[in-house]
Amino acid sequence: MPGLEDKLKAILFKLSQSSPEIQASAVVSMDGLMLASALSPGTKDDDVAAIAATLLGLGERTVEEFRQGSLEQVYVKGSKGYTIITNTGQDTVLVVVTDENAKLGLIFFQIRIVAREIVQAFANLLESPGSGPYMR
């Protein structure tokens, strides 16, 4: 039976196949631990995880300060693309990196689908005897 990391990698692979504008993706724990990734060559897992955790922390502080409820997503636009960090509700975030030509409506739709699949992967894992949330 495949472990959590394998299931998450399969989900990320499917996401990358859904849109040519998606350059990289990852599932990161809220505390900055890389759980699974489909990153561009030369991109370091630890760097992506640390950046995601930092941006998530800043986003949480921002929505708290402005009383905007709970953080759902952090969105960064650069001149050559977008980085979207989405809270999956499982003490994890989904990081998606796209090029500048990305159709954001479609990307956000795909992110919602993938976030549900990540939730389901964790739910299936927790239903298995002798498994913990970060078992590989």
Image (cartoon, grey):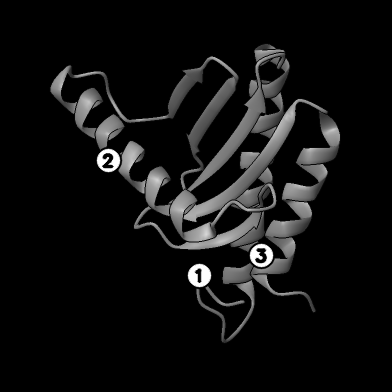
Mark 1 or mark 3, earlier in chain: 3
Q: Is residue 113 above or below residue 51?
A: above
Task: Give the CA separation, mark 2 to mark 3.
Answer: 28 Å
Could you tell me how far apart the alpha carbons at marks 1 and 3 are, in whole angstroms? Answer: 10 Å
Q: Nearer the viewer, mark 2 or mark 1?
A: 2
Q: Position of residue 102 (x, y in %)?
A: 71, 17
Neighbour class for label 3 at 10 Å: few (<14), some, many (≥20)?
Answer: few
**Can you tell which mark lies on residue 133?**
1
Q: Looking at the picture, how far across and down is residue 12, in whole percent? A: 72, 48
Cβ atoms at labels 1 and 3 below 8 Å apart: no
Q: Which mark is residue 57?
A: 2
Amino acid carrying label 3: it is: Asn
| Residue at horizontal 69 percent and vertical 23 percent from the top | 107
- For this orientation, the residue located farthest to the bottom is 130
Task: State which quadrant residue 96 falls in.
Answer: top right
Residue 56 occupies which quadrant of the picture? top left
Residue bearing the label numbered 3: 124
Q: Is residue 55 left or right of residue 126?
A: left
Front residue of 78 and 12: 78
* The N terminus lies in quadrant: bottom right
Q: Residues within 10 Å of mark 1 (few under 14, many from 20)?
A: few
**What residue do we see at 78% from left, 56% from top?**
10
